[in-house]
Image: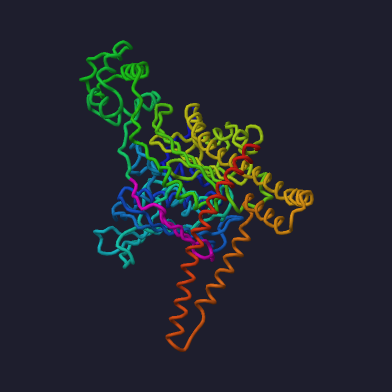
């Protein structure tokens, strides 16, 4: 064995040397991760306090970075949330794994308490300065401004500078970071893609952002409903490995096994404990303290729980965006000429409650040169955009497994479909399993991929119906054009055979145009003539009141005549309409 001294490291020290694990592997990711963590914290805080969020973002390149091929970037995010107490500032921004949401079983964005502290560490390492925070709660007479840094050796937050200031709002939080990074606006890892995606799955969000010297963009909220966060849910025993189960035991300490079953898990009833006795569990253990159980007994307890059938966990803990709210948000993606939205009922996948929601939109203004490009895929986990490492994600695997050709879209084999489409897929669950600490990819279990497939196929069916309707309309128009092209030739030929007069031929041509629905130009011309006649009658000015009265009488007479004429034309129009409907039915029968 080596005689070298074995040392231990703090959590902060570990992450400071491995920031790539939490989203800081490149300059582009550093900007996006910092922005994402700040906005996630703002949204979570507002929703906890039942406040409609108003978030302001500023991002700009302010100079040369300290590293090669890097710029110094400034990111500022402010909100109208409840604010943070002075005693919690150092923990929130300077201490790893300090979170009020860790392991609560709720559908919140942040859970582990790593992200925002990692952003502070990155700023410290690349710009020698942590995060500047301004915050104010309703109880604070003045706002507090402080510079927070991470004590890497101790994994503690340090308040370097602190002072009270006057602020222009009753409550809220504002954070400002300076660090090395690279700005990417468009594309899968782009800032604009992230901001639009965030606004899509958060219809209650009012977002303003300004990038460099460009004009400020405002995305107003499309829903005024605050988010009702579901109650937290306890974990299901079948989702745990042995090590996780033993760690869960240690969290409860000296409570009895019976109490542990009731408070530590969901879906463990007295019937379950009776069934467990068939698999090595002893009923006498129910009244024993968890700390009195030996490792062997803990192991048997775990095996007994895994061997019995348990009810699926409750689905009341999941949060839905809803089809109505998601439909209103789709316009934030750009000019859309059609979209379909599907919000599935909560389901159980891998013993975890899950809600899957899908929006498929067809954009108007994508250049024709891009028709053969893949559709844009927007992935979301607990209403947070996922923008990297998409190939291994459960959402992408589900999209690729769908036969999009059946819905009228071009698709290479086992790939994302082609065309000017956006496919947005949201997964919400209190227990989403990610493939890494940076939460960029959802683990692709068979049950989850199948649930995603079903939701995507439902949205695809709605899109297919619309595309088929367009094809039928185009085919109908083509037939109309065919008749329009050869109908006049037929009229001329029949006119020569029957020696019809020019007046009869004219009426025949007009009748054909009316049947084909091409008489709009004639109607517009008649309307124009009627308007000119009306102006002549009402537009004559006179010096005496008598001439004015005469004009009024003429106008009134004109109106009465027009009404009488309208009644006659109304009867005629009804007859024409019936003729048109019969012709349309005949054409559709031909189709």
374 on left or right of 192: right
Residue 581 x/y as whole percent: 57, 45
Residue 197 x/y as whole percent: 49, 49
> Does the magenta run of residues contain 506?
no
Q: Give the vertical position of 502 relative to 481 (above or below).
A: below
Quick one: which residue is furthest to the left in this view? Answer: 287
Looking at this view, is 339 or 42 the one in front?
Answer: 339
508 on left or right of 40: right
For residue 411, what is the image quadrant?
top right
Looking at this view, is 528 or 574 the one in front?
Answer: 574
Residue at image location 25% in from the left, 21% down from the top: 292
Quick one: which residue is furthest to the top in this view? Answer: 278
Residue at image location 62% in from the left, 41% down from the top: 472
Looking at the magenta stretch, what is its main secondary structure? loop
For the C terminus, the quadrant is top right
Residue 408 x/y as whole percent: 62, 37
For residue 527, what is the image quadrant?
bottom right
Residue 246 x/y as whole percent: 34, 25
Looking at this view, is 194 or 16 the one in front?
Answer: 194
In the rendered picture of this protein, how many numbered marks are placed on residues? 0
229 on left or right of 372: left
Q: How are the residues colored?
A: rainbow
421 on left or right of 239: right
Q: Which residues are magenta?
A: 205-227
Looking at this view, is 14 or 191 the one in front?
Answer: 191
């Amino acid at each position: 064995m080596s005689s070298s001294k074995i040392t231990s490291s703090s959590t902060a020290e570990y992450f400071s040397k491995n920031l790539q694990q939490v989203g800081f592997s490149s300059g582009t990711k550093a900007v996006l991760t910092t922005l994402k963590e700040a906005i996630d914290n703002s949204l979570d805080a507002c929703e906890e306090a039942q406040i409609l969020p108003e978030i302001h973002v500023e991002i700009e390149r302010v100079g040369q970075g300290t590293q090669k091929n890097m710029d110094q970037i400034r990111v500022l995010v402010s909100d109208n949330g409840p604010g943070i107490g002075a005693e919690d500032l150092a923990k929130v921004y300077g201490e790893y794994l300090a979170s009020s949401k860790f392991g609560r079983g709720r559908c919140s964005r942040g859970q582990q308490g790593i992200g925002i502290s990692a952003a502070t560490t990155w700023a410290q390492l690349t710009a020698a300065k942590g995060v500047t925070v301004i915050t104010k709660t309703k109880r604070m007479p003045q706002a507090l401004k402080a510079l927070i840094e991470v004590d890497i050796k101790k994994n503690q937050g340090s308040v370097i500078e602190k002072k009270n200031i006057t602020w222009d709002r009753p409550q809220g939080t504002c954070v400002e970071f300076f660090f090395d990074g690279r700005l990417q606006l468009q594309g899968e890892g782009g800032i604009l893609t992230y901001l639009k995606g965030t606004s899509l799955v958060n219809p209650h969000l009012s977002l303003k952002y300004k990038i460099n010297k460009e004009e400020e963009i405002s995305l107003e909220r499309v829903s005024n409903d605050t988010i009702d966060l579901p109650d937290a849910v306890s974990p299901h025993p079948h989702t745990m490995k042995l090590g996780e189960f033993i760690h869960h035991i240690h969290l409860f300490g000296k409570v009895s096994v019976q109490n542990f079953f009731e408070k530590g898990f969901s879906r463990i009833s007295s019937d379950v404990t009776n069934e467990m006795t068939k698999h090595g569990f002893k009923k006498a253990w129910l009244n024993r303290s968890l700390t009195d159980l030996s490792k062997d007994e803990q192991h048997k307890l775990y095996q007994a729980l895994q061997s019995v059938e348990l009810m699926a966990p409750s689905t009341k803990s999941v949060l839905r965006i809803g089809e109505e709210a998601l439909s209103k948000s789709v316009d934030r993606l750009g000019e859309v000429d059609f979209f379909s939205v599907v919000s599935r009922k909560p389901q159980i996948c891998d013993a975890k409650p899950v809600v899957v929601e899908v929006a498929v939109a067809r954009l108007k203004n994508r250049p024709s040169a891009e028709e053969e490009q893949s559709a844009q895929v927007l992935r979301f986990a607990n209403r947070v955009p996922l923008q990297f490492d998409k190939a291994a994600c459960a959402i992408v695997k589900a999209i690729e497994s769908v036969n999009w050709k059946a819905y009228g879209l071009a698709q290479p084999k086992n790939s994302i479909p082609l065309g000017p489409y956006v496919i947005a897929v949201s997964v919400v669950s209190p227990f989403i399993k990610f493939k890494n600490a940076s939460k960029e990819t959802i683990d692709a279990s068979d049950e989850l991929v199948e649930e995603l497939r079903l939701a995507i196929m439902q949205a695809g069916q709605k899109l297919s119906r619309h595309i088929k309707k367009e094809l039928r309309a185009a085919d109908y128009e083509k037939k109309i054009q065919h008749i329009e092209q050869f109908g006049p030739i037929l009229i001329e030929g029949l006119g020569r055979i029957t020696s019809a007069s020019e007046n009869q031929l004219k009426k025949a041509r007009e009748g054909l145009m009316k049947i084909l629905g091409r008489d709009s130009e004639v109607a517009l011309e008649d309307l124009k003539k009627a308007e000119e006649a009306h102006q002549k009658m009402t537009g004559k000015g006179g010096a005496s009141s008598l001439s004015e009265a005469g004009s009024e009488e003429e106008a009134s007479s004109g109106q009465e005549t027009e009404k009488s004429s309208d009644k006659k034309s109304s009867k005629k129009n009804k007859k024409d309409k019936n003729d048109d409907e019969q012709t349309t039915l005949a054409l559709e029968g031909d189709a």
